[in-house]
Image (tube, coloured by chain):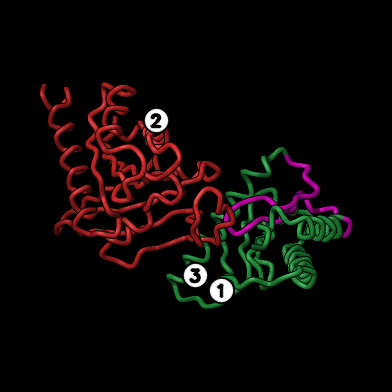
Amino acid sequence: MSLAPHQDPAVIELGRAELAAVRDTATSLVTASLLSDDGFEIVRVADASSSDGARFASMASSIQALSEAVARELTMGASEYVIIAAERGHLIQMRIPGSTIVLAALFDTDEMLGKALTLSRRCAARIAAGLPTTPPVPEPVRAWI
Amino acid sequence: MAEHVILFAGPMGAGKTTAIEALSEVPVVRTEAANTDRATADKETTTVALDYGEITVSDTDKVRLYGIPGQRRFDFMWQILKDRARGLIVLVNADAVDPIADMLTFIDEFRVLHERGGVVVGITRADLGVGPGPSAFADALQVAHPEMLVPVFTVDPRKTDQMTTVLLALVANIEMRAALSPEAIH
């Protein structure tokens, strides 16, 4: 049986390297996490906030699932990401293509939303390319909360 | 239309999603993810936000059924859903390592719903003959919470008739306790 992503050293190391690359590119990145579909933190970088990483991973998992449930309910079809835009930051979530892993990245409002989204998408694509296996996943979803 | 919110709580694998599927008249909203914690419950998927179903009781009454995620790491959802609910059905699988402790954990966590409305316990997978019998659950509840009036049933969450019985018992419990409340008597 394969390891769960949050227990797989190869996935953790890949994630750490790719999230660090985003941090090095964008000083606006406050924190970024990879999490399993069911809410376990795989790796997190650039945590300048005081948030509890494990708790955030659980919340991000719920948000992902809820956004996908809404998209199913409204027959919105396949899509890509969730954005929470707040007074002091943009939280972007998306599935790593072809996996059960979710990327959640919080940027401060100095960053343009479009650039933050582009950085997140590229990071997700690089992680997808580096993953050792690609288990099937539910349809991806785009939703704004 | 009056709307009543009933919560389904209990550990992962107790049958909460299945029970709501059995009761709901509308397609159930599910938020399931691939389960990577097979040591806790050996099943493919697990609820990570909520389940949602509905029953229309009459022209004027609708019951909304919400299932919580069973794992404590999702306790922020517990609080969100607890604030909306008036009644609680705790489902516990009898073949768990310590199902009585599981039951008491969720009773304690959602105790406010006993004060606000009512609580019923459903013991699932009791037909496997593993673990304590229903009287052991009732006795443990009596010892831990002698002030609480909580009916205990064995139930198959796949069976609509059995889940309906549990739900009606909860409604009766809520109404009886409301009728006996000091506000109702005076």
Residue A139 bears which disc, if any? Answer: 1
Segment tinted magenta in the rendering: A24-49
Query: What is the quadrant of the C terminus of chain B in the image?
Result: top left
Give residue A36's position: percent from left, percent from top: 64, 57
Q: Is residue A123 left or right of residue B112?
A: right
State which quarter of the image contains the N terminus of chain B.
bottom left
| Front residue of B97 and A48 | B97
Q: Determine whether, in the image, residue A11 is placed left or right of residue B127.
A: right
Percent position (x, y) of residue B74?
52, 45
- Whole-number angstrom distance, CA of label 2 to CA of label 3: 35 Å
Residue B55 in sight here: yes
The outermost residue toward the front is B129
Q: Amino acid at mark 1?
A: Glu
Q: Which residue in the protein does label 2 denote?
A: B108
Q: Earlier in the sequence, mark 3 or mark 1?
A: 3
Residue B174 in which image quadrant: top left
Chain the render paints green: A
**Circle 2 — which element?**
helix
Residue at the (52%, 48%) spot, across then down:
B40
Q: Nearer the viewer, residue A91 or B5?
A: B5
* 2 and 3 marks on the same chain: no
Which chain letter goes with mark 2?
B
- Front position among marks 3 and 1: 1
Task: Indicate which disc residue B159 carries.
Answer: none
Check disc 2 and give the amino acid type: Asp
Q: Are marks 1 and 2 in contact (CB under 8 Å)?
A: no
Helix, strand or loop at disc 1? loop
Q: Which mark is residue A71?
A: 3
